[in-house]
Image: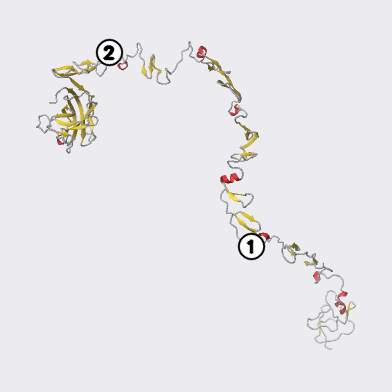
Amino acid sequence: MADIQVANTDADLSENTIITEENAYTITGLHTFSRSTNAPFACISGSAVVTYLDADKLDGQEGAYYLAATNATGTLAVNRGGTGAATFTDGGVLLGSGTSAITATAVLGDGEILIGDGSGDPTTLDVGSSSSITVLGTVATGTWQATDVGVAYGGTGVSTLTDGGVLLGSGASAITAMSVLADSEMIVGDGSGDPVAESGATLRTSIGVGTGDSPQFTAVNIGAAADTTLARASAGNLTVEGNAIYRAGGTDVAVADGGTGASTLTDGGILLGSGTTAITAMSVLADSEMIVGNGSTDPVAESGATLRTSIGVGTGDSPQFTAVNVGAASDTTLARASAGNLTVEGNALYRAGGTDVAIADGGTGAGTAAAGFAALSPLTTRGDVLYGSSGTVTGARLGVGGANTVLTSDGTDVAWAAAGGGASKKYTATLAECTNTTTPTAIISWTVPANEWSDGERLYLRWSTLQKQNTGGDRYSEYDAFFGSESFEVNLMNGATSVTSNNVNEIRAFYAHEFIRVGSEIWCFCGGLSPHESVDWPDFNMPGRIAKDNGAGGAYHWISVVASSADFTASLACSITVNHSTADATYYVKPQTCSIIKTEGSAA
């Protein structure tokens, strides 16, 4: 027997006594170990087992007893590796419950499956049958990557749809999408086929609010959602926010709303207001009656003297007016000019003790007979003759005649003529200046009346001018004579022979022209004289129109002008025109005097 070594000095092997034995030994007899709070002995780990331990009994039972399942009693808890249950539903699915006993679901019906919710026990979901899935719930996650789900199975039947297009069903066929609706378009059906997109007048007609429709509304809000509501009050009557809208044949428009409050008024009667009460009408005014108020009650109708007195123009009144229009509204206005003086249209009315009647108004403009005659007489110079001219009866002045002249008459007017001469006629000319222009200007104009210039008669033209040409260059003035409305000309002076050539100072020039009618022609002689200037005959350069006789200076130069377009039986307009070569303010011709006399003569 191997030695047993005691590893402490106490006689009693207790407490912390350790016994070690390296060799095998046999213990006989009964040895009792006290466990108290500590294990009485410990087995060193190893692979060896205790032989014949199963032959010994534990709690009076041999080891084989504990191996027989029939000897087990109670249920084995889950925390001991058991189920915690003694029985489970046949066919039920077992569900864990932590350390609690395992439970079993009821037997699942045909097509039922268990679906968890992530928190508690799973629940059942019917998907059809055990042979096929025919019922689908909501697929919360995941991507369907198989064939398009047909409409018959709850799908659309297509893989893509127009973005923004409204979807249309087609029975069991795939869903279709309309084109994207344009601005203001709406979908309208026809009760048979696919709906269509409509807008504008077409849409309004489809929904019953087109121009040809008469839609019915309980009310219409105009311009705002609630404060201008148009509604029906009764048949044919409308209101806005409960306020009546007036119409023909409806309620009379009240005075408070700008109406009369009446449906009929006296024809021709003057209307009178009565506060907010309906307007009333006066009786028709009689001839010449007017309405006159008294400042307190309704006005009354008045006429005659009563009316005139009421308005301040009675026989006992002295009304004041700014002016009085007599017989017309504006062209004969009688007004006050000053104290005691009146005007009509601004023209003074003459009165005794007032302004002398002017000559222009048929008076003398003077307060005495002598002064009146002096004011009326046209005579200005000793020797002047007063005679009737151009049909006037007031008289005209004929200036004193020259020496050895006599007063002659042509049957119409009088004129001075050389003693022993034939009848003559004097014409009045219109004079005009030609300054600072190159435009031909008529400086002398006169008219020979129709049938007055007989064959063989001579027309003498005498005239003078003030004229000037600035220095520098050969500037000239061309003088032309025109006879007749269609004009033909006789060139009197031009070129360097002009009497104004290069003259710095203003000069007075004198001209004498003699014109004689020879059948249908007019012949002329031209002459001129100015101080300090030589006189030369002009150059007549108008081929085909004027023929001339180039005689020596000092003799008559008769120029034959064929008056093919002149008509002596019509009024003949005549003139002398000037055409300057240069426009210059210091280059001018200013006629001063002119005498035009026609005498009888002979063409020989």
Instruction: Examine the image and state in which quarter residue 556 appears.
Output: top left
Compared to residue 40, the image places residue 177 above or below, namely: above
What residue sits 50% from the left and 15% below the top?
311
Q: Position of residue 429 (x, y in %)?
A: 22, 25
Which residue was labeled with disc 2? 372
Badge 1 marks a residue whose secondary structure is loop
- Front one among 173 and 203: 173
Query: In the figure, is residue 250 to the left or right of 405?
Result: right
Q: Quadrant of the N terminus?
A: bottom right
How crowded pointer 2 is (Cα within 10 Å; few <14, some 14-19, many 20+) is rated as some
How crowded pointer 1 is (Cα within 10 Å; few <14, some 14-19, many 20+) is rated as some
**N-term-proximal mark, 2 vs 1:** 1
Which residue was labeled with disc 1? 148
Q: Is residue 154 visible?
A: no
Query: In the figure, is residue 203 to the left or right of 58?
Result: left
Distance from disc 2 to disc 1, alpha carbons, whole Å, reads 129 Å
Instruction: Examine the image and state in which quarter residue 506 appears.
Output: top left
Q: Position of residue 214 (x, y in %)?
A: 61, 39
Q: Is residue 298 visible?
A: yes
- Front one among 454 and 420: 454
Q: Position of residue 517 (x, y in %)?
A: 17, 27
What residue sits 56% from the left and 49% below the top?
183
Mark 2 vs mark 1, foreground winner is: 1
Q: Quadrant of the C terminus?
A: top left
Q: Tell me which amino acid carries mark 1.
A: Asp
